[in-house]
Amino acid sequence: MNPVPGILDSNNHLFALAQRGQRFPSLITAIAIVPIMLAIMIATQVWMRVVFRSLLGDGAAADFAAELIGFLSIFGGLWLLLRFWSKRPFQSLGFERAQSGRRVARGALVAAMMMLATAALVMIPGAMVGPGELQKHGLTALGVGLLGFLATSVQSSAEEALFRGWLLPALGVRFGAWRGVAVSSLVFAMAHVTTRPTPLGWANLFLFGMTTALIALAEGGLWSASAWHAVWNWIQGGLLGFSVDRSVSSGLVASIQTTGPDFMTGGSFGPDGGVVATAILLVGIATLLTRRASHPGS
């Protein structure tokens, strides 16, 4: 039996998938595709918001539909790129069907444990806990919460497809897995400039990118990374009502506002901008680096 490759092995399955096409991108092409796809997403969201507001009026429903279609446009753009330029199937981004359900469940469970630990720790210095949407509106809020989770899942999966399915292998094949992880994580952090991160927020965005990149390499695909990304974000904002990248909303079960020092809690940026999240992400990265990469289909 062949030995299982290490997580940063140059023969990682995610890298092998990226080389199945007829064309492999240059460094300039690989990086340039990222802002192009993000520009398409933003333009789609702006246009769809105009369309849906004319049909549905100003309100959350129109904005929700526009946001969802905007992130779906990333999938569409990548599909066209792979189909007509790279000449390889969309699933070669890391969405192979084998064991997909198990991998989604595993990524979701790990993210839930990590975010709940983060939430508990940032509340230690003090927090104000307000009622959640379930307490305010009863079971009718559950449907809205599930729609929020759907939107978060689409957004997170689209970002994983772009940064870890497209960019990470394109860099890793040419320059090695570690450089691919580092550079793709840096580009991921820079793509969040509009959220005005704090210094710790910038660091944590980079570590967040490293975490999902290493999850993708450990799996040889994107199912676990996409689920981890979605559940981390949704529990933080959609379930517990913390601020997420300065976006404030009432959570499904609570609305939590921390009162401790900003360096620990993240302040107005949310827990992602504090040293607690830094520590949790570093523990996750250290744990992932001890793993071996999965065989295809395992």
Image (cartoon, rainbow, N blue to C red):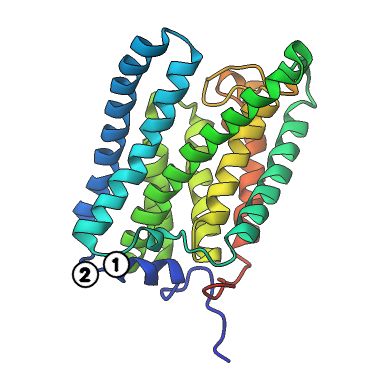
Q: How many numbered markers are drawn? A: 2
Query: In this rendering, does residue 170 appear at all?
Result: yes
- Foreground: 91 or 243? 91
Residue sitting at x 55%, y 23%? 269
Cα distance, mark 1 to mark 2? 16 Å
Q: Amino acid at mark 1?
A: Arg
- Foreground: 261 or 77? 77
In which quarter of the view is residue 37 placed? top left
Residue sitting at x 75%, y 11%? 136
Q: Residue 118, position in %: x, y?
A: 71, 36
Binning the other alpha carbons within 10 Å of mark 1 as few (below 14), some (14 to 19) or many (20 upward) gives: some
Identify the mark at residue 261; answer none if there is no mark. Answer: none
Q: Is residue 78 left or right of residue 23?
A: right
* Secondary structure of the residue carrying numbered label 2: loop
Residue sitting at x 20%, y 66%? 23
In the rendered image, the residue lying farthest to the front is 55
Q: Is residue 144 left or right of residue 73?
A: right
The numbered mark, 1 or 2, whose residue comes first in the sequence reads 2
Q: Amino acid at mark 2?
A: Gln
Look at mark 2 in the image and give the residue it sits on: 22
Q: Residue 65, position in %: x, y?
A: 44, 24
Look at mark 1 in the image and give the residue it sits on: 174
Binning the other alpha carbons within 10 Å of mark 2 as few (below 14), some (14 to 19) or many (20 upward) gives: few
Say above or below: 265 vs 215: above
In which quarter of the view is residue 18 placed? bottom left
Quarter of the picture containing the N terminus is bottom right
Q: Is residue 49 left or right of residue 245?
A: left
Q: Is residue 270 left or right of residue 83?
A: right
Residue sitting at x 36%, y 45%? 75
Q: Residue 83, position in %: x, y?
A: 25, 58
Say above or below: 166 vs 273: below
Q: Residue 219, position in %: x, y?
A: 55, 64
